[in-house]
Amino acid sequence: MKLRKLYTGNVVYGELPKGCKLCLRGLKTVVFVTGLCPRDCFYCPLSAEKRGRDVFYVNERTARRAEDVVAEVLSCGSRGVGVTGGDPLVRLDRTTALIKAVKEFFGESFHVHLYTSGKTLTSEVVRKLEEAGLDEMRLHPDARDVDRVLRTIEESEPGFQVGFEIPMLPDAVEDTLRLLEKLALHESVSFVNINELEFSESNSEELRARGYKLADDWRSAEGSREAALRVLEEVSERGLSLNVHFCPAASKDRYQFRLRLYRRGTLTAMPHELVSDGGTLLKALISESCENAPPLLVFRGRLGYETSVLAAEVFGANYQLLEELPDSSKTLLNIT
């Protein structure tokens, strides 16, 4: 197997997991089942509003039930969901009910992958996830818990795909290689995703205390990308029988998030709203007393009367350009 670099900046050795293929095309809806987690990783990037709290979100909106997830998936035209947290297995009943609901509504081809620390993973839990319809599990166990998790997976023989997903600490190249060598010996593990270590408001203090520095992109840790590429090059040289994938922080914003927003915009935009290349909604905001307001395509928005930019230009109406995100709350970005 050879290393290959994708147009997104991701680097792959072997085969890319199906969940990642869909994510990079903006075809996955993110379901945050709970912020509760049995681990307390110093690099956890979750916000204070989510970390350690039993909250339920789908993409950027609060959810209460599986129907909320189904509605958001339809709005985004997604072909699958990524179930995350926290650790979704802390709320196993909620998680399995969600998986069953989306599978029943969208069909068996609808792809569901799940992230977990594996701390509460047992053969019985694996059985329940398989019965619910899970397609892909991504494990991030504590180093001391890896052997137990591997035994559980091998004894359970799940029908879904199993992989590991870990952040790339800049000073952990050798530790990461030892882990990959171990995982390559287990046929039950088919892939490992290595994520660029991200700085966030909630983890920056802990990262800096350990000597990590913010990179020039203002989102990742300095040296994380270089360390991940060294790991991949070594994996290739050793010829490990394991699919390994490096996911840079930038690709999550530029492709996973932006393409999903663009799809949501094209599916939910009003007739007068233009979806920009960046996935935002553009429209003209005109005053109520505007004498040159177009007679058609005038809508009452939250800030006043709106129409399309084209209609405003054609009729010579004075307007301000309004830019919003196509999320559930139509987040306001700019008025110019």
Image (cartoon, grey):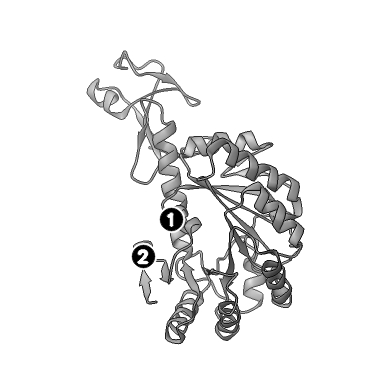
Is residue 133 visible in the rendered image? The answer is yes
Disc 2 or 1, which lies upstream in sequence? 2
Query: Residue most toward the left?
Result: 314
Residue 24 got which mark? 1
Is residue 171 visible in the rendered image? The answer is no
**25 lies above or below 97:** below
Contact? badges 2 and 1 (CB < 8 Å): yes
**273 lies above or below 151:** above
The total number of labels drawn is 2
Quadrant showing the N terminus: bottom left
Q: What is the C-alpha distance between the residues marked 2 and 1?
A: 10 Å
Q: Nearer the viewer, residue 332 or 251?
A: 251
Quadrant showing the C terminus: top left
Q: Looking at the picture, which amino acid does disc 2 mark?
A: Leu
**79 lies above or below 177:** above
Q: Is residue 40 left or right of residue 160?
A: right
Q: Residue 54: image x %, image y %? A: 75, 48
Q: Is residue 198 left or right of residue 42?
A: left
Q: Residue 65: image x %, image y %? A: 68, 36
- Disc 2 is placed on an element classified as loop
Q: Residue at x 47, y 69 (%)?
A: 245
Q: Residue 243: image x %, image y %? A: 48, 71
Residue labelled with disc 2 = 6
Residue 116 got which mark? none
Q: Residue at x 45, y 43 (%)?
A: 261
Q: Residue at x 61, y 35 (%)?
A: 68
Q: Nearer the viewer, residue 254 or 115?
A: 115
Q: Is residue 164 left or right of residue 240?
A: right
Q: Residue 178: image x %, image y %? A: 59, 84
Q: Nearer the viewer, residue 221 or 263?
A: 263
Q: Looking at the picture, which amino acid does disc 1 mark?
A: Leu
